[in-house]
Image: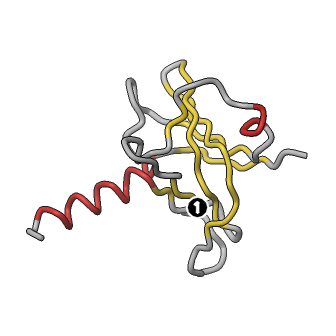
């Protein structure tokens, strides 16, 4: 592998991972809570499949071939609507490129 691969891995990690900047305790994140990420930007809403840490608000995307961010392209299914919801905002005008740049991230459990 050449040098360029490290840069590519860092770019993909930034694109597919959000680290909770306000977490109270230092820990190694344990991602095991499936959630839906709802991102609001420029009067639009996009949804993503993510897995949240059970100790803080950090999350990673559910990667699929050709869809590294876990973007949901169709309407949410009934099963997806029952999952906990993470809501965030982005200053992007067109597409969400980096989860690391999301703002006002909040978590809401469904009953």
Q: Position of residue 98 (x, y in %)?
A: 39, 46
Q: How many marks?
A: 1
Foreground: 109 or 62? 62
Q: Quadrant of residue 44?
A: top right
Q: Nearer the viewer, residue 103 or 6?
A: 6
Identify the residue shown where x is 29% and y is 62%.
10
Q: Residue at x 77, y 47 (%)?
A: 108
Q: Residue furthest front?
A: 65
Name the element at disc 1: loop
- How is colour applied across the structure in the image? secondary structure
36 versus 28 height, above or below: above
In the picture as drawn, the residue positioned furthest to the top comes out as 43
Label 1: few (<14), some (14–19) or many (≥20) C-alpha neighbours in 10 Å: many
What residue is shown at x 72% (from left), y 39% (from top)? 80
Most extreme residue toward the right is 111
Residue visible at 59% across and 81% down in the picture: 26
Looking at the picture, how far across and down is residue 62, in whole percent?
53, 52
Q: Is residue 9 left or right of residue 45?
A: left
In the depicted view, which residue is nearer to us: 8 or 45?
8
Residue 58 location (% of width, % of height): 58, 61
Query: Horizontally, is 38 left or right of 65 in the view?
Result: right
């Amino acid at each position: 592998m050449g040098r360029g691969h490290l840069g590519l891995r860092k770019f993909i990690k930034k694109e597919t991972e959000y680290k909770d900047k306000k977490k109270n305790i230092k820990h190694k994140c344990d991602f095991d809570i499936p959630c839906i990420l709802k991102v609001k930007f420029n009067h639009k809403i996009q949804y993503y499949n993510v897995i949240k840490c059970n100790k803080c608000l950090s999350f990673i995307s559910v990667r699929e071939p050709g869809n590294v961010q876990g973007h949901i392209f169709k309407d949410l299914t009934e099963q997806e609507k029952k999952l906990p919801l993470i809501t965030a905002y982005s200053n992007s005008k067109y597409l969400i490129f980096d989860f690391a740049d999301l703002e006002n991230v909040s978590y809401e459990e469904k009953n």
